[in-house]
Amino acid sequence: MELLSLLSYGSEGWGDEILASIGVTISLALATLPFGLLLGFLLALGINSRESSLQISAKIFTTIFRGLPELLTLFIVYYGAQILGNFLFQTVFGTTIEINSFVAGMVALGFVFSAYASEVFLSAFKGISQGQYEGSAALGLSRFQTMRLVIIPQLIKLALPGLSNLWLILLKETSLVSVIGLADVVRITGVAARVEKEPFLFFSLACLIYLALTFLSSAGLEKIEKNARRGEVRS
Amino acid sequence: MSEAYVAQEMIAARPRPNEVRKADWTFARLLGSLSILFWIAAGIGLIVFLITSYDQSQIDKYAPRYFDGFLTTMKLVALSVSIGAVLSLPIAFGRMSSNKIVRNLSFGYIYFFRGTPLLAQLFLFYYGFGSFRHFWQDLNLWWFFRDAWSIALLSFSLNTAAYQAEILRGAIMNVPKGQHEGAASLGLPPMVTFFKIILPQALIVALRPYGNEIILMIKGSAVVSIVTIFDLMGHTRRAFSQTLDYQTYLYAAIFYLLVVEIMRRLWDLLEHRLTRHLRR
């Protein structure tokens, strides 16, 4: 019973703090997602492009961010942005700036996510036959219209399984941002564990929270995938 | 007289149409050139930064530590991947077992280790299990649970075992049913069937995911620096906290990139060699 009171909601227990930290974890993952998806799609377009310069630079990007450990990427973005931001603000305004760990985490995780997402999009592009482009050209659609009306609706369906995998990885990787001070689940449970001297309770709670989050997201993603496949003939 | 289907007069030859000329500077080319310029500038900037802030005494002090950290990282990855490979066998079989309890147990194991972050697992093992000091002392296992290195090795092995079990299961399920039937019709015992027929074919399929898993472990092993183990990342963080010099992280980045790229190339070569009988 004593242990349960530690988790109660209010000033005595850690329930409210931990609940807020779940919100931080989810919002970091959700904030990274659109940024990473857009960048990943653009990278895939770059690698598919006929311009060799564009291909090479997109490949450099993906090689770097797939090769670096996420933790190191996080530190490089966090401290690099701090130094660069301080330098710019010093010369322009004469003040310093504090880089937010949420934003640094979002940028670093977004870069890593986009590097992996570009692979998923590339293999999805391979699943779309050349006839789709030719058909669109025959209908007189512009390149942008072809992309928007013909290719992307099919692409999403093909990319969904890979992307849902990446989402689960992203959700787990947000835990790394606790190292640079973001008050996410791992950070808050760590603080609670140290204060209450109950590390087993709080860290297993953290694991359970992540399990619940991955369970809920995989259930949701399955719904979305089923919805995306509703046009297909059932075999 | 019907009308002749022949042209009344010759059609004069016309000049060929103008070649469709592409614009010299399309948007894509502009963007590509700009991004290439950006990477060149970034590369030169990196080199200039590393040269201008070059300090022989710091290099002398930290280079051996980085190398030492690199060896620690490699040792951790090699050991945990091997232990995980051994552990993954029973888990993968449990997952495919016809016994419901065994199947659910191994499913639960895999779900737990794949569904939670490595960092949280490491904390749970290191701080969480470490809090039951008397229990471990009674079991004479306290030396194991006190040591950050052995705990890191334990949690990494358990973690990668879950991932490798899924890889192995997928690969074994990928072997066509006819192979089992063929072996059975030849009267081969189950052990021989598995080790001589199923596993060799499954490992070829599993080669690529195994390589990816090793690379993921190299990258993931950076989190052990948080529980006071001085791997490459740990030495980097200590060097940064002592010197407050940004180039410590840049050197670590170059190191990690090199290791991962070399590993990837080596794995490509290995795969090329091992699948040579499948190519035409």
Image (cartoon, rainbow, N blue to C red):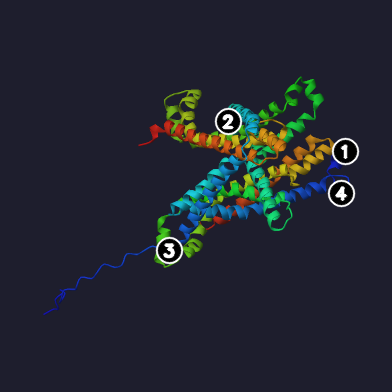
What x and y, as percent, mark residue A155? 51, 55
Which type of secondary structure does the marked residue at label 3 adopt? helix
Q: Amino acid at mark 3?
A: Ser
Mark identifier at residue B95: none
Quadrant in which residue A95 is drawn? bottom right
The answer to whether marks 1 and 3 mark residues whose Cβ atoms lie closer than 8 Å is no
Q: Amino acid at mark 1?
A: Glu
Spatial CA distance of label 3 from label 2 is 49 Å
Mark identifier at residue A136: 3
Left or right side of A208 for B55? left
Spatial CA distance of label 3 from label 4 is 60 Å
The answer to whether marks 3 and 4 mark residues whose Cβ atoms lie closer than 8 Å is no
Q: Name the residue tied to disc 2.
A: B93
- The subunit letter for the residue under badge 3 reads A
The answer to whether marks 4 and 2 mark residues whose Cβ atoms lie closer than 8 Å is no
Crowdedness of circle 3 by 10 Å Cα count: few (<14), some, many (20+)? some
Spatial CA distance of label 2 from label 1 is 41 Å
- The subunit letter for the residue under badge 1 reads A
Q: Amino acid at mark 2?
A: Phe
User: Do tags 4 and 1 sit on the same chain?
Assistant: yes
Quadrant where the image shows the N terminus of chain A: top right
Spatial CA distance of label 4 from label 1 is 15 Å
Q: Residue at x 48, y 58 (%)?
A: B30
